[in-house]
Image (spheres, helix red, strand yellow):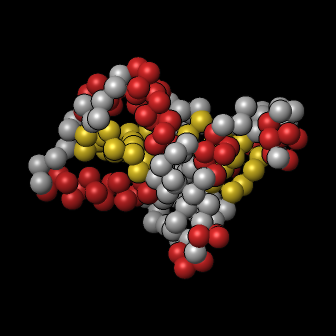
Amino acid sequence: EQIRTNVALNEANVKIAGAHAGVSVGPDGATHQAVEDLAIMRCLPGMTVIAPCDMIETRKAVLAASHLKGAVYVRFAREKTPLFTTEETPFEIGKATVFRDGSDVALVACGPLVHDALLTAAELEKEGIDCRVINNHTVKPMDETTMIQAAKECGAIVTVEEHQWMGGMGSRVAEVLAQNYPVP
């Protein structure tokens, strides 16, 4: 209520850090596993929603959010996550990054599960499946161009995130594809 009324509806220049997101918080259980936060924040007017993949990208996201006028929600993981981006890895709010090219299927991921998507792509390559991996760190506004291009070039998209199936990053990808270029 406070975020909706005092921040979003008032177009306040507020930055929100959400910690303990997803199921990777481990043994703390369901009371500590926020799996609806992206959906809640995504539906608020004017709210930018970011789920960075590692510590280096998180620093870039926080700095970029600080320069953006308006409300921003940045989702933090609790557990240690592998570092796999560098200072040179591009980061721009609203612009997804292709971490691995492929033509059979696109794995679109956000948060720490981007690393898992890269590992999965390497395993599937052994079976002859060529996976594109897209780091979709900005859930809102989403990089629709990259999603549509992946759909056209790969013909299928699998989303990977720590969120319930309704309202999160995967739902937004499905909305973009349904409106522009439906694929499985």
**Residue 55 seen:** no
Q: Indicate left or right for 141 with 162 as reference.
A: right
Residue 11's x, y, as percent? Answer: 83, 32
> What residue is drawn where x is 60% and y is 66%?
33
Return the residue found at the far bottom: 27
Give residue 10's quadrant in the image: top right
* The quadrant where residue 177 appears: top left
Tell whether 98 sits left or right of 72: left
In this image, 12 relative to 133: left or right?
right
Image coordinates for residue 58, horizontal then vertical, percent: 60, 54
Name the residue: 49% across, 57% down: 162
Where is residue 167 drawn, in percent x and y?
A: 55, 42
Residue at 64% across, 70% down: 32
x%, y% of residue 29?
Answer: 58, 75
Q: Residue at x 53, y 75 (%)?
A: 26
Extreme residue toward the top, this view: 180
Question: Horizontal placement of 35 versus 171: left or right?
Answer: right
Q: Foreground residue, 136 or 35?
A: 35
When the figure is inspected, residue 27 is found, relative to residue 134, above or below; the finding is below
Q: Up-down: is 98 above or below 75?
A: above
Task: Give the position of the C terminus as an image quadrant.
Answer: top left
Query: 66 and 11: which one is in front?
Result: 11
Numbered marks: total: 0
Let me know if residue 168 appears in the view: yes
